[in-house]
Image (spheres, coloured by chain):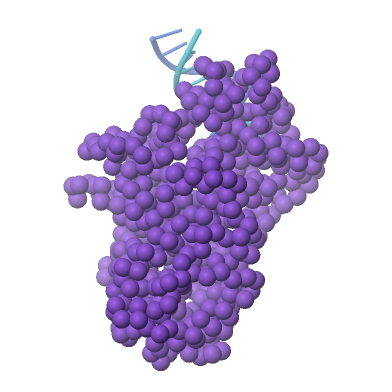
Chain colours: A purple, B blue, C cyan
Amino acid sequence: MSLLKSCVKNPAVGDSVVYWMRMEDLRVHDNRALARASAQAKKDNIPLITLFVLSPQDYIAHDRSSRRIDFTLRNLRSIQSSLAKLHIPLYTTSLSPRTAIPSYVLSLLREWNATRLFANTEYEVDELRRDIKVCELAQKEGVVACSFIHDKCVIPPGDILTKAEKGYTVYSPFLRSWIPHLTPGDGKEDPLACAPPPAENPASVREHPLYGKLFDTPVPDKVEGFAFLDKDEEERIRTCWPAGEEAAQQMLDRFLHTMARSSQMGAVDPLAEDPTRNSTKDTRVGKYKDARDRVDADTTSRLSPYLAAGVISARECIRATMELSTNKKQKIDASRDTGVGRWVQEIAWRDFYTHIVALFPRVSMGRPFIEKLADIKWESESSEDHLQAWKDGRTGVPIVDAGMRQARAMGWMHNRVRMTAAMYLVKDLMIDWRQGEKYFMETLIDGDLASNNGGWQWSASTGVDPAPYFRIFNPYIQSKKADPSGEYIRYFVPELREVLGDEIHQPSPALADRLGYPRPLVDHFEARERAIRRYKNPGQE
DNA sequence: TCCCGTTTAGA
DNA sequence: CTAAACGGG
């Protein structure tokens, strides 16, 4: 798979090498394009310059959340200071319209007299088009060589194909093929190898007439149109999700080496705890197999925001996991149904969905993977009200409402609740899954096109390897399994704080009325029948 | 990465 | 009586 090729061979050595950082690779450690750019700069004995171009128009077009934009800026600040220690400037600027970006980047390269550009590939359609344009322009000028490098996935799109050389569209054979790729073949490079850290620029670059002033450009405080609602929201989100590679490493460490707290309380400050180290299998990852579906305890990795923004690499996650096996005889087996196995398989899901977007781009252009399901009849009557109620967490189904309120409060949801809330929107309320996909992107801090689209198309039964249309979640059963203590619901739905016991999962209308909690928008069993009927005959009532 | 009604096995 | 097993959606 090489949509993007190096466009100019062996350009003359210029005065600098440029690494162009994007929203999905916000790190210094284990960053392939950065490492390659640095190696080239070292070889040519010229300085390395790094660049980030904010693109508000893209953020609007892609439904980026203010949380994600703020997270990007905070991480950029952290990166700027890490790079400054190596005398490497990070020049951050903002540009619209987005169509102007390719020529603008070329003009910067000209200004900096750079003849080589390195970047990690983004697989979304608009981003690929942008990069192709950059290549075309570079080719026309004939002085700049562009290198776009696979870095997002553990195993790059195109490397995992069926015998017929097609992309896998079912997860389990994909996984079977993915796992062996983790171990290096004979004489081959280790796919999990850590990219070398960038080398220092000579300190003199700070005095350079062109590059010196780049150190003085601060990362902007905000992007127009992506402000937090208020100070309170800003502080809450920033406490939940501290920026920087160190925070990401700590989050991984917390998951692999520390014990889970049994309570949801304090969950909005994940790093605040005393990390109780444990040498046994009582770690979060060790208990992941059984505990992962519990939402009333802090049992998951919570790495999704860091992975989505590339603050930590997926490779690093796998590497650190493999190192858990102290005796080399007992290697980590990623295919096992164990805590560690399931965790590695979650990273494989991330690769899977990214490969799908790269190989079948139409899924991300508003099309269902299963085309005949494009004709499903969605509710139009009262759907505006229902959609708003779903977003606000007042559907009258406690587990769904708790999840939706968690999304608003933290910019993050437990995956089990994502599936439950998504399935409820699509199958119970019968609202177009693209509406839900959009809202998740607008609200969550970990919004990633591939994973989000993959998850929604799974719930809507329209995707690759989807939930069969008749396998509709019963939200009340999901609630009892995921939140047996009821603590999660009580935490995020204060109206129900006094309700103890199983009634919290499905309060009677009388109790709901008394507590000022909404009654269910629809009857689950009727809605279920309706969904099955419509899915059976797409295009009909 | 299921739900549900029904049947069947076993205490 | 309860839990597992089963088949259809």
Question: Where is residue A74 drawn, in percent x and y?
Answer: 45, 57
Q: In screen coordinates, is A423 left or right of A122?
A: right
Figure check: A528 above or below A177:
above
Quadrant in the picture for the C terminus of chain A = top right
Front-lying residue, A392 or A166: A392
Question: Where is residue A238 drawn, in percent x and y?
Answer: 46, 47
Q: In screen coordinates, is A321 left or right of A149?
A: left
Question: Where is residue A9 drawn, in percent x and y?
Answer: 44, 88
Residue that appears at 36% across and 51% down: A247
Residue that appears at 39% across and 87% down: A15
Front-lying residue, A440 or A101: A101
**Which corner quadrant of the image does residue A428 belong to?**
top right
Question: Where is residue A408 drawn, in percent x and y?
Answer: 57, 41
Residue that appears at 30% across and 85% down: A45
* Residue A541 in view, yes or no: yes
**Which corner quadrant of the image does residue A246 belong to?**
bottom left
Q: How many marks?
A: 0
Front-lying residue, A94 or A100: A94
**Which corner quadrant of the image does residue A16 belong to?**
bottom left
* Residue A334 in view, yes or no: no
Residue that appears at 29% across and 77% down: A203
